[in-house]
Amino acid sequence: MSNASKAKRIFIVSHPQSRSTALFMSLCQYPNTVGLLEPFADSYFLGPHCKSTAMKEIVGYDKGESFIYWKQRCLESNSDVLIVKDHALFLEEVFDFIIEHFILVFIVRSPYLSFTSNMFADSDLSQDDFIKVYESFNINMAECYKKFLDFLEKAHTSSQYKPLLLSATELVEKPRATIEKVCKWADLQFTESLLQWDYCRRSSVNIKLPDLTVFFLEHRVFFKNCFDSKGLKSGNERKVEEIEFPPYFQKALVTSLQCYDDIMLIGHSS
């Protein structure tokens, strides 16, 4: 199936702290667009057939929707464009579904940078709960990169077209060129509105937030900086030499870096 025939459904595949929410918010400014922000994470952690109970104690409930529910929501959308963003770690059950029905855009960020992003979150969670969330996501970060690599390789071999691979640094340093590249890939017309947004007008953009995403947004764990911003802005990544990694993250970091190198090799060979 050609890119143009799938242009109404775009799936952003990511890992935690990859700048993927900024890319998602940008594309959701396209006219008559519906956005689903991390629906399958909701199923993974809180759904009736959840794969992990790590978040249930922190969130305090387990009423997430099933994987089947969100698949149906994707297929039933009557908007001109559907944008879905989720982490590769949560997508194993729906890999084939996504490859069949979506244009795929992968966005990756160096583990040196993604591992440290959560350290600076301005959250109002209790310190104990924040540490639980932080450690859960970062200790599992190696698995996130593994699944990202697996999904990228599968998409290359299973799809009739190659997925688009972006780097987070590319999005930050060259936002216009990067968004223009995505639009060309998905056969969408680039507009200036894709470079800016307003959190107060979010409801008019029709972004659907699953319960888990709402919880994180309300407690300023992951999404606050992006949602409170006015759009994509150029910026500088943190310098690696300024970062002190906790000792128990070292093994996960090494594994993630190995996967990251393999991911970038696929990107260079495309």
Image (spheres, grey):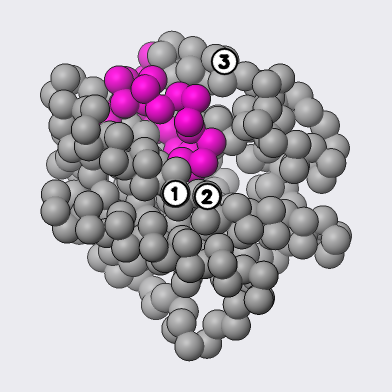
Residue at the image point whose x is 16% and y is 32% from the top? 161
Q: CA distance from mark 1 to mark 2?
A: 5 Å
Amino acid type of the residue tagged 3 in the rendering: Tyr
Work out which residue is located at the far bottom of the displayed protein and give it. 241
Nearest-to-viewer mark from 3 and 1 = 1
Name the kind of residue labelled 2 in the image: Glu
Is there any visible trace of residue 156 in the rendered image?
A: yes
User: Residue at 75% across / 36% down in the picture?
Assistant: 53
The quadrant in which residue 34 appears is: top left
Marks 1 and 2: CB-CB under 8 Å? yes
Report how far apart the C-alphas of labels 3 and 1 lie in the structure. Answer: 26 Å
Label of residue 146 in the image: 1
Taking the magenta stretch, the answer to whether it contains residue 191 is no
At x 48% / y 88%, what residue is drawn?
241
Image quadrant where residue 31 sits: top left
First reached walking from the N terminus: tag 3 or tag 1: 3
Please tell me how crowded label 3 is: few (under 14), some (14-19), or many (20+) other residues with Cα within 10 Å. some
For residue 252, above or below residue 235:
above
Which one is earlier in the sequence, the residue at label 2 or at label 3?
Answer: 3
Residue in the picture at 63% in, 58% down: 139
Q: Which residue does the numbered mark 2 point to in the structure image?
A: 143
Which of the numbered marks, if any, corresponds to residue 71?
none
Distance Cα–Cα, label 2 vs label 3: 25 Å
Label 1 crowding class (10 Å Cα cut-off): few <14, some 14-19, many 20+? many
**Residue on which the image places disc 3:** 69
> Residue 152, percent across and down?
31, 42
| Range of residues picked out in magenta | 78-103
Type of residue at label 1? Lys
Is 92 inside the magenta-drawn segment?
yes
